[in-house]
Every structure is written in C-alpha cells, then in structure tokens.
Image (tube, grey):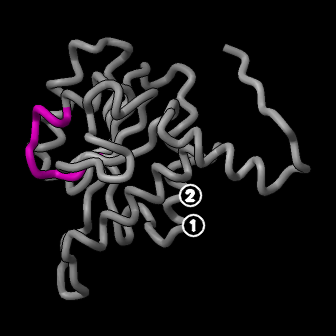
Amino acid sequence: MNNRRILVIALGASLIPRLGWTQATKRRPIVGVIRINPRNTNETFVEPFRRDMALLGWKENDNVEFVFAWAEGRNDTLPKLAADMVARGVDVIVTFGPDGTRAAQSATPTIPIVAMADNLVGAGLVQTMARPGGHTTGVSILATELDVKRLELLHEVSPPRPRVASAS
C-alpha cells in the first residue's frame, strides 16, 4: 500500500477519537468511504484499508464500522452517495477526487471529511494544507506548497548538489 493511502487512513483514524466516544458508548463509530470507480473493477483500496485500519487498532465489526459506496464511474451519483452517508449517520467521510469531496462538503457542514485529491488547495477544497479550515482535511497529491520542504529533505539526505533541476 502506498504512503498516501496510509496517510489517509491515519488521518481518518486520528479523527475518530476526537469525536468523543467513551467506553460506555455502545455504538461503534462509522467511517463512510465514497469511491468513484465501479465496485468490482480495479478495486485496490478496500482490503488494504481494512487491513491497515486493523493494524492501527480499528477492527471492523469490533470497534468500528465501515460503509463503502461506489459511484460506478459516474460523478453525477456522488451527491446522492454523500447524502446517503449523512443519512446513515457516519462519523467520518473518506473521499477521493475533487468531485467526491465537493459532494460530501455539500451534503454536510459538520461531519469531518478526509479527502485525497490532486490539489486540495488549488481546487478550493481547503484553505491551506497547514490549516485546512472547515471540516475537510486530507492528502493533496500535488501539494506544491510542500516543494520547498521536499527540497530541504532531499538536501539533508543526499550528498551536496549545487543545483536541482526540474523536468517541466
């Protein structure tokens, strides 16, 4: 499983304790996941998600419930899927891409959303990566505001280089 998915999972898991459950609470937290792809075609997320959440201590049907929804490749179904998640009372919504994230944002002003998209800031889904604002956070695959930090890390772990070139 790649690092971005692990980060999304960790972000989702980190939100669950903040929602205020106690040992006395009988209801398990519900994590809703909205996928754009068809359910049975090239689905490479669900099983690694379940496995990695279990490694983090979140075991399905034990102390957490997962609800998955597939848009079958149709963006026009995303608002209905997001509304269904809200109606089911999910505690966190995990989305992929700007359309899924916008659908979730439109469906609820309060339920935390963990999004994965090319550019969360550029798409207007969050204010900044450091301070997303609102109830949406996540992983921005093309987070250009992190480029300076990436170069600093490269400089720390590699031999000194007078110049770093870009393939633009």
Say which element carries label 1.
Answer: helix
**Magenta segment boundaries in residue numbering:** 104-113
| Left or right, 129 with reference to 168 | left
| Cβ atoms at labels 1 and 2 below 8 Å apart | yes
Q: In what quadrant of the picture does the N terminus appear?
A: top right
Q: Give residue 55's mark.
A: 1
Residue at image location 34% in from the left, 33% down from the top: 121
Residue at image location 21% in from the left, 69% down from the top: 19
Q: Is residue 32 above or below residue 105?
A: below
Residue that protrudes farthest toward the bottom in the picture: 24
- Going by the numbered disc 2, the residue's amino acid type is Asp
Q: Position of residue 167 (x, y in %)?
A: 72, 17
Q: Quadrant of residue 60?
A: bottom left
- Going by the numbered disc 1, the residue's amino acid type is Leu
Q: Which residue is mark 2?
A: 52
| Left or right, 161 with reference to 25 | right
Residue 29 falls inside the magenta stretch: no
Q: Quadrant of residue 122?
A: top left
As measured in the structure, the alpha-carbon distance from the residue carrying label 1 to the one carrying label 2 is 5 Å
**Mark 2 neighbour density, 10 Å: few (under 14) some (14–19) many (20 or more):** some
Q: Position of residue 133 (x, y in %)?
A: 21, 49
Residue at image location 68% in from the left, 43% down from the top: 151
Q: Which of 16 and 32 lies nearest the eye of the viewer?
A: 16
Residue 109 falls inside the magenta stretch: yes
Residue at image location 52% in from the left, 68% down from the top: 56
